[in-house]
Image (tube, rainbow, N blue to C red):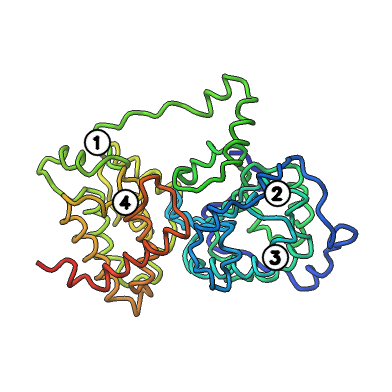
Amino acid sequence: MSSDLLVDLNDDLGVDAPSSNALDQLKLSPMGDKLWPPDDSSMSKSETDISKRLGEGSHLSWDHPYYDIARHQIVEVAGDDNFGRKVIVFNACRMPPHHELDHHKLLMYLKATLDQYVESDYTLIYFHNGLTSENKPSLSWLRDAYREFDRKYKKNIKALYIVHPTMFIKTLLILFKPLISFKFGRKINYINYLSELEEVVKCEQLVIPTRVRDYDEKIRASLKPSVQAQMSPPRSPPLPNQQFGVSLAMLRAKSSDNEAVPLVMRETVAFLMEQGLEIEGIFRRSANVTLVRDVQHRYNSGEEVSFSQMEDVHLAAVILKTFLRELPEPLLTYHLYNDIVNFHIVFLLIFYKHSEINKMNNTNLAVVFGPNLLWGQDAAMTLSAIGPINNFTRTLLDQHYMVFSP
C-alpha cells in the first residue's frame, strides 16, 4: 500500500470544512464546465454500457425516485472492513456517459445512502479505473459535491482508499489541496493493487467490477515474477489455538469442555454486558487498528485477553463483530448451533433495552450486525442484499419471543 497523503486510521475527528469563499475562489476556467482531459486509461464502448443485469439488480423498485441512479450500481455498501467500519464503495467504471446520468441526482443518492451509515465510523473505497472523458463529472460538480458533504458526513469517515490511482487523480487532489483540511488529507490512501486492499477489507465481500479486476491482473502481470511472489505470499495454516477464521465445528472440537459458544464470543459478550450497555453508539465506533490486530494475535496464539485492562470499550465490540465476520460460514446458517444464535440475539436485545442511553434500537443493531450474521455463498455484499439482510435481522430482534420460544 503506497500513499502520498498518509492515512491516520486512528483520527477521531473529521474535516474542518473550508469557508465558502475558499470554495468560490477555486478557478474553474477553462476546464470547469467542459469535459475532463483524457485520462491515461481507456475504456471500450462495451465497457461503458451498463448491462441489463445491473438494472435488474437494483435494490429499489422501478418507481422509486432514485431507481434510475441505483440501477447502475455506482454506489454500493459492502459490509464491514477488517476493523469493524462500514464500507461504502464508489465504482467509477459504472458511471454512464454524461448524457445518460443526472449528476445532481447521483449526488443526492450518494447522500441518501451515506445518511444510513454516517453515524457509524465508515470507510470509503473509490475504484478509479474506468473514469474517462466520456463519464467524468465537471470540476464545478466536484466543488458543489464538496459543499454538500458537510461535517455530518466527514466526521466519521476514517479512511478514503483510491484504488488504481492515475496521475490525473493525483493532480486533481493537488488542485483541490487548498480546500482539503490537513486531517482529511491524512485519511486519503492510494491502493495500487487489489492485493493491498486485502489489508483493509476482504475483497471477496466486494462486488468488484470485472474491468477493475482485469486491469489489476494486467498491471500485476507487467511486474517481475519476484515482485509478484512478494505480493501474493502463501496463506499460513491455522495456529493450534486459532480462534479467528476457523469454523464453529473446529472451535467446538478443540474446546476442552466441548463448549458450543466460542471463547471470543463468551469473553467479549461478558465484558460488553458489564461495561458497554450504556455507552452511546456502542457497535458503531471503530477501535485502534494496532490494538485490534494485537488482540486477534493473542487469541490465535492461545494467550489470555483481558478487556478490562484496556481503555477502549469499543475494542471488545469490534473484536466481536470481527470474529463473526471472519467465520468461514455465516452464523445464521448453522442449524446445529441454535444455542449460539439464541445466545447472540438475547445479547443484542439487552442492548436494545438500554437504547434510550446507548442509541442502539433494533434498527440500528440490525444495520450493524446484519451483514456480520448472514451473507451469500459468494460473500459479495451489495445494497440489494444488505437491505433484506438488515430487515431479516431486525425482524429476528422484534419477534424474538416468537422465533426462539420453546
State if disc 4 and disc 3 touch (CB < 8 Å).
no
Of residues 245 and 336, the one nearer the viewer is 336
Give the labeled residue for mark 1.
241
Disc 3 to disc 1, how far (Cα)? 52 Å
User: Considering the image in quadrants, where does the N terminus appear?
Assistant: top right
Name which of mark 3 and mark 1 comes first in the sequence: 3
Please give the residue where the numbered disc 2 appears in the rendered image.
131
> Looking at the picture, how far across and down is residue 49, in whole percent?
65, 50
In contact (CB < 8 Å): disc 3 and disc 1: no
Q: Nearer the viewer, mark 4 or mark 2?
A: 2
Q: Looking at the picture, how far across and down is residue 82, in whole percent?
A: 43, 48
Quadrant housing residue 14: bottom right
Q: State the separation of the CA atoms marked 2 and 1.
A: 46 Å
Q: Is 90 in front, or is 224?
A: 90
Q: Which residue type carries mark 3?
A: His
User: What SS does tag 4 mark?
Assistant: helix
Distance CA(mark 3)–CA(mark 2): 14 Å
Q: Nearer the viewer, mark 4 or mark 1?
A: 4
What distance separates the C-alpha of mark 3 from that of mark 4? 38 Å
Q: Earlier in the sequence, mark 3 or mark 4?
A: 3
Nearer the observer, disc 3 or disc 1? 3
- Looking at numbered disc 1 in the image, what kind of residue is underneath it? Asn
Residue on which the image places disc 4: 324
Task: Give how far across and how far down residue 390 sits, in percent.
Answer: 37, 64
Secondary structure under tag 1 reads: loop
Q: Is residue 26 above or below residue 353?
A: above
Residue 146 shows up from this direction: no
Q: Which of the labelled discs sits on residue 103, or is there none? A: 3
Residue 212 pos. (x, y %): 60, 41
Q: Earlier in the sequence, mark 4 or mark 1?
A: 1
Question: Tag 3: Cα neighbours inside 10 Å, few (<14), some, or many (≥20)?
Answer: some
